[in-house]
Amino acid sequence: MTKVFRKELESLKPYVPGRPIEDVKREYGLKDVIKLASNENPLGYSKKVREKLMNSLDNLALYPDGNATELKEALSKKLDIAVDNILPSSGADEMIDLIAKTLISPGDEVITADITFPRYISTTKMMGGTPIIVPLKDYTYDLEGILNHISNKTKLIWICNPNNPTGTMVTEEELMDFFAKVPENVIIAYDEAYREYVTRNDYPKNSIKFVKKYPNIIILRTFSKAYGLAGLRVAYAVGDKEVIKNINKVRGPFNVNSLGQTAAITALEDDEFIEEVYNLNLEGKNYLYEEFRNMGLHFPPSETNHIYVNVEKDAQEVFVELQKRGVIIRPMSGNWIRVSIGTMEENRIFIEKLKEVLGK
Ligand SMILES: *Cc1c(COP(=O)(O)O)cnc(C)c1O
């Protein structure tokens, strides 16, 4: 049997998502469990979106608009770029997959970081490409190091800014310098899943202008994080028309479901909700920073809705011990965990249980 499967799949493992709350309740017989493991939005999603969705339940017997025309038009207006430069997808996850299918042939090299979003590497392997891993420097994407690894086989570079899981960012100035040095036949996929949470002024707030200047840049954005719509699976790419046209050839005909399209259009109009999300995240982040400092724990400063923190104890062990106490976080390698910033109450419970587990 093994011979029937593509050899590219041999080194692949299925993605391990954050553990669902119900799973943990069942295993440990707990009544209350909080999940700070998947960077989900503790505020949920916009009430305006909810209202719109409640009035959109009648048409589920029909296929969604395969072209997502209204969503593309809404995005085009909001971002000030043509409809032909935009392609919605079923989450950024699908877009990562589509980009790999569009670009990577066996033997092509794809450059990314060692500690970053894992799907960049698995989709590369899936297509028979070779991942070239450039270690983070100071927990941050090493753009200089990436430039040094470009070869005549390089097809694609993945940059996650700010980065998941370390929360760090590269500045607009550093990026502009980098973009200018990357050959035009190398595509740069620039994943901005956490852009709405960034506090620093030297972050590129308007990345759309990159696409207007460089046809080899593809921007990825999602409605799963700050917009709180992870369950509906909506994201999009912005890129050169030729690039978008080719990605569009490999996508499924109805990849974005109808409720997702409706929700995303309405979500784009609710800037107040995003502001609320930003403020709550900042408050939680400052609280967690202070508590971590009091415990003497090391962490790189985060520009996202999660913090990468060294708990000075085996992460897997801390993960299990926290779980027994009703808190789900994400164990990373060694002594590092990633915790999503929750509501203030969730943050306090997490700190209380973490102190117990670490004996602080
Ligand atoms: C969460 C996340 C994604 C996937 O988001 P979806 O739109 O829910 O598929 C992509 N990239 C990064 C860096 C993420 O953290």
Image (spheres, rainbow, N blue to C red):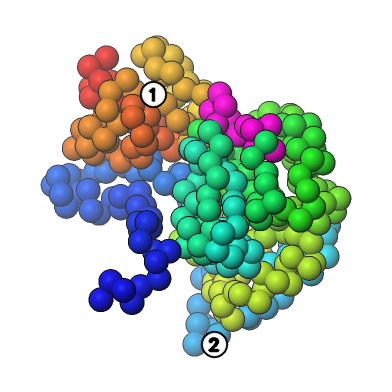
Report whether 281 appears left or right of 309.
right
Above or below 55: residue 78:
above
Residue 53, by quadrant, is bottom right
The foreground one among 218 and 359 is 218
The foreground one among 135 and 269 is 135
User: In the rendered view of the protein, which quadrant contains the N terminus?
Assistant: bottom left
Residue 204 shown in magenta: no
Mark 1 packing: few (<14 Cα in 10 Å), some, or many (20+)? many
Above or below 192: residue 185:
below
Identify the residue under disc 2.
Answer: 62
Residue 143 shown in magenta: yes
Question: Residue 144: image x %, image y %?
Answer: 68, 32
The amino acid at mark 1 is Asn
Question: Residue 239: image x %, image y %?
Answer: 75, 59
The foreground one among 238 and 74 is 238
N-terminal of the two: label 2 or label 1? 2
Residue numbers of the magenta segment: 136-147
- What secondary structure is marked by label 2? loop
Above or below 294: residue 254:
below
Report whether 24 appears left or right of 77.
left
The amino acid at mark 2 is Leu
Which residue shows up at 39% across the image and 12% down it? 296
Given the current orientation, which residue lies at the most extreme bottom position? 61
Which residue shows up at 30% across the image and 41% down it? 328
Disc 2 under 8 Å from ligand 1? The reply is no
Q: CA distance from mark 2 to mark 1?
A: 49 Å
- What secondary structure is marked by label 1? strand
Question: Residue 35: image x %, image y %?
Answer: 34, 44
Q: Which mark is residue 89?
A: none
Identify the residue under disc 1.
Answer: 310
Can you see residue 351?
no
